[in-house]
Image: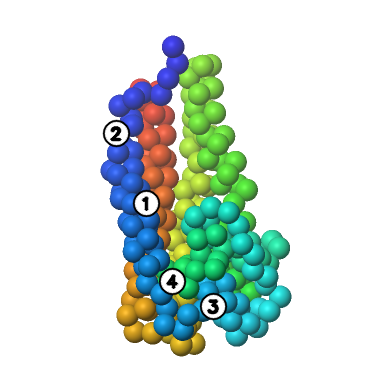
Amino acid sequence: MYYIPDSSLIILFPAMLIAFIAQWRIKSTFNRYSTVRSSRGITAAQAARYLLDRAGLNYVSIEMIGGSLTDHYDPRVKKLRLSQTVFNSTSVAAIGVAAHETGHAIQHSTGYVPLILRNRLVPIANFGSNAAWILVLLAFITGYNPLINIGILLFSAAVLFQVVTLPVEYNASSRAIRLLEDEGILYDDEIGGARKVLSAAALTYVAATLVAISQLLRLILISRRRND
């Protein structure tokens, strides 16, 4: 009996298409350069360890985690976690990913403002993205439309999180490429391959931002329809 108008879903289609393309591109690009071995022959974990030590971050530990492309830096415990497909790989793709996560560790150590803001937004964004749709559903059930406006406000935090994520990710990638080149870990065409992998990864964050913005616009459209 109570539902969100299906016609509002059309707002999501362009962003979802871009998200699909982004996921396909990162997987295909990563797989392509996973077969290209670096001339130095060091693993991604070794490259990350070297870059961390050079940055004075010898206290940051590195550990392997399950999955594929689940790599991340955890600022709470100062650990750089590399996926099974990256940790022991000597490929250009894996080293690029490891260097990117090293970039996040360096951001954290230097107090990079967008990263600090993103970390502080995490609990608010998680709560807002989940609570918003619950409030919309309650608005449909109870007929109390102001709940939708509260949901819009909460979901805005999730959108802000995605927007702030963009400079954080692009900065980490630019740091990674610069470090790999300056430290002589990758050479010539290898740098180009790592750059392509990280550019493809960056597109996934752009897509996530577009999806979040589209969801916010959808909420606003629902609110206006209810008020009309």
Measured in 3D between alpha carbons, the distance from the residue under mark 1 to the one under mark 3, in whole angstroms, is 26 Å
| The C terminus, quarter of image | top left
Residues tagged 3 and 4 counted as in contact (Cβ below 8 A): no
Of marks 4 and 1, which one's residue comes earlier in the chain?
Answer: 1
**Residue 134 in the figure: left or right of residue 7:** right
Q: CA distance from mark 2 to mark 3?
A: 45 Å
Label whose residue precedes the other's in the sequence (2 or 1)? 2
Q: Which residue is mark 1?
A: 23
Residue 178 seen in this snapshot? no
Residue 16, placed above or below residue 119: above
Per the image, label 3 sits on a secondary structure element best described as helix
Q: Residue at x 34, y 64 (%)?
A: 32
Amino acid type, residue under disc 4 in the picture: Ser
Q: Earlier in the sequence, mark 4 or mark 2?
A: 2
Q: CA distance from mark 2 to mark 1?
A: 21 Å
Of the numbered discs in the image, which one, if any, rests on residue 10? 2
**Residue at 37% from the left image edge and 72% from the top image edge:** 36
Q: Tell me the crowding category of disc 4: few under 14, some 14 to 19, or many 20 or more residues within 10 angstroms, Cα based.
A: many
- SS at mark 2? helix
Q: Nearer the viewer, residue 197 or 105?
A: 197
Q: Amino acid at mark 3?
A: Ala
- Please identify, in this view, whether the residue under mark 3 or under mark 4 is nearer the observer: 4
Q: Secondary structure at mark 1?
A: helix
Closest to the observer, 74 or 134: 74
Look at mark 4 in the image and give the residue it sits on: 91
As shown in the figure, which amino acid type bears the numbered disc 1? Gln
Camera-nearest label, 1 or 3: 3
Which of disc 3 and disc 2 is earlier in sequence?
2
* Label 2: few (<14), some (14–19) or many (≥20) C-alpha neighbours in 10 Å: few
Alpha-carbon distance for marks 4 and 1?
A: 20 Å
Q: Is residue 179 visible?
A: yes
| Image coords of residue 199 (percent x, y) | 36, 66
